[in-house]
Image (tube, grey):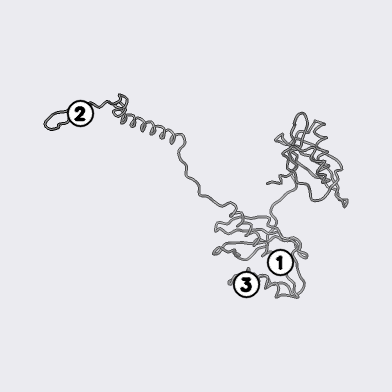
Amino acid sequence: MISVARVHSQTLVSVTPRSIWRIRLARELPRYLLQALAVVGLLASARFAIAPPRPVPARTSTSGFAAGNRAAEGFATLFARSYLSWDSRDPEAHRIALAAFVGSWMEPEAGLQPPESGEQQVRWTQVVQARVLASGEQLYTVAAQTDTAGLLYLTVGVVRKAGELALAGYPAFVGAPAATGAVAPAHLNEVEEPALETVVTRALRNYLARAESELDADLTADARVSLPTQMFALQSLGSLDWSSSGRSVLATLRARDERGAQYTLVYELGVRLSAGRWEISAIQTNPDS
């Protein structure tokens, strides 16, 4: 590069060397940047065409929702138990039990007037059906086994008012949810491997007898098994069939408990062939889930 300077009326010329590649880079850099931006734009357009962005759904608290449902179910169950339990010799106890549920607009004791004599106690209750109405009300059908009227079904509506559970209105007596007899299982392929049948029979015998150390010999290294809480004796293995997945078997058996009661039971066992030997990877349940 040549520069000219005038000093004391004399002209001086100086030469400053520069690399050719720097001169070319300074001259071509704007063009390279424009080309890079164009390429990035094309890639972005292709990405949006192939996989356009989708709105991210709002996060919901599954555990909170489930916990809310359990709370409402418990509320309906407690009401049903208090509502259906009464003793004519102590009418005040029934009023007190329902006081926490009854609103100011409702009749006393939620409209129930027990008879002048007798009593009724609830042995157990269970929510057997639930549905959400358009208003947001949760309507539960509660089965209640009583000692005098037998098995009753009561619908109880539950809402949240200022964050608190409350009755949505008076209850109603209804019939049981529709049900039918047991459905026959789909046709399955019978296990025709004597070695597998031997392992399954031995594993189930030890499992039912709570013989943990003997059972371990037939389990895979990663098997997780939870033993039954009481002991049973395996009497016979009725049938052994492959499940539809082909990775487990269904064993129908007869067992007897320590008091002499006999049962027909079905167990699903995960099975795995390792080095020519059958092993059990699971029995009926996953204790970790």
Apparent side of residue 250 relative to residue 39 in the rendered image (left or right)? right
Callout count:
3
Q: Which of marks 3 and 2 is nearer the N terminus?
A: 2
In the foreground, 89 or 201: 201
Mark 1 is surrounded, within 10 Å at the Cα level, by few (under 14), some (14 to 19) or many (20 or more) other residues, namely many
Residue 103 in the image, given as x and y percentages of width and height: 59, 70
Residue tagged by mark 1?
84
Instruction: Tell me the element at label 1.
Output: helix
Instruction: Tell me the element at label 2.
Output: strand
Residue tagged by mark 2?
3
Residue 28 in the image, given as x and y percentages of width and height: 30, 27
- Could you give the CA–CA distance between mark 1 and mark 3, rounded to whole angstroms? 16 Å
Name the mark on residue 283.
none
Residue tagged by mark 3?
107
Look at label 2 and name its amino acid: Ser
Q: Are marks 3 and 2 in contact (CB under 8 Å)?
A: no
Instruction: Tell me the element at label 3.
Output: loop
Q: Earlier in the sequence, mark 1 or mark 3?
A: 1
Q: Do the residues labelled 1 and 3 touch (CB within 8 Å)?
A: no
Q: Residue furthest left?
A: 9
Q: Earlier in the sequence, mark 2 or mark 1?
A: 2
Q: Residue furthest right?
A: 260
Apparent side of residue 179 relative to residue 40 in the rendered image (left or right)? right
Residue at point 55%, 63% (across, down): 163
Q: Would you place residue 188 above or below residue 64 in this image?
A: above
In the foreground, 130 or 166: 166
Q: Would you place residue 127 above or below residue 114 in this image?
A: above
Look at label 1 and name its amino acid: Leu
The quadrant of the rendering that contains the N terminus is top left
